[in-house]
Every structure is written in C-alpha cells, then in structure tokens.
Amino acid sequence: MNREAVEAIVVTVIAVIVLAAMIGFAYLGFKGAYLAYKDGYPNHYYRDALISAGISLLMIIALGYWVFTVVRRNRAKA
C-alpha cells in the first residue's frame, strides 16, 4: 500500500472511534440531564449534563470538519 492509502485508513479508523465515543458521551449527557430533571434535582445537575452533551456535539462537528479538510487536502495533492 502507498502512503496515501495508509493515511486514509488511519484517518478513517480514528474518525470512527472518536465519533462512536462522542455519540456515546452525548447520549449519556442528554440521558443524565433528563433523569436529573425528571427526578427533581437542582438546576446545576442537569445544566452540567447538558453542557457535557453540547461539548460532545461540538466535538462531532469538529471531527467532521477535520475529516473534510483531510479529504480536501488529499484531493488537492492528486
């Protein structure tokens, strides 16, 4: 395999692992916020869970941008 193929495989593996982790963190954050709100905990409990879920969603967007720039850079080289 040439260098570009190895780089594409590495980027894909990293992107899939990070995407799965961030989706899991976002799910747990939203679920924690819902349970804290439903059970009547003070505001800062579900606020913190929503902040955590929001950061996870921002990381998903950043990951998409990173993959997009890697693909664009590789197409520019070709």
Image (cartoon, rainbow, N blue to C red):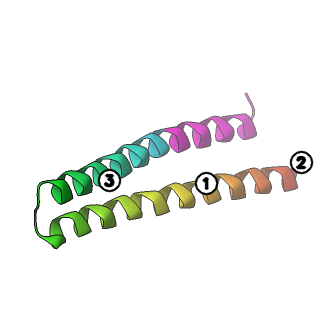
Examine the residues drawn in magenta and state their main secondary structure.
helix
Is 27 located above or below residue 65 in the figure? above
Q: Residue at x 48, y 63 (%)?
A: 58
What's the amino acid at mark 2?
Ala
Which portion, as a residue range, is magenta?
Answer: 1-16
Is 28 located above or below residue 8 in the figure? below
| Residue on which the image places disc 3 | 30
Q: Quadrant of residue 38?
A: bottom left
Q: Quadrant of residue 41?
A: bottom left
First in sequence: mark 3 vs mark 1:
3
Residue 78 has which mark? 2
Quarter in which the N terminus is drawn = top right
What's the amino acid at mark 3?
Phe
Give residue 26's position: percent from left, percent from top. Answer: 37, 51
Q: In this view, does 11 lie to the left or right of 49?
A: right
| Residue on which the image places disc 1 | 64
Q: Are marks 1 and 2 in contact (CB under 8 Å)?
A: no
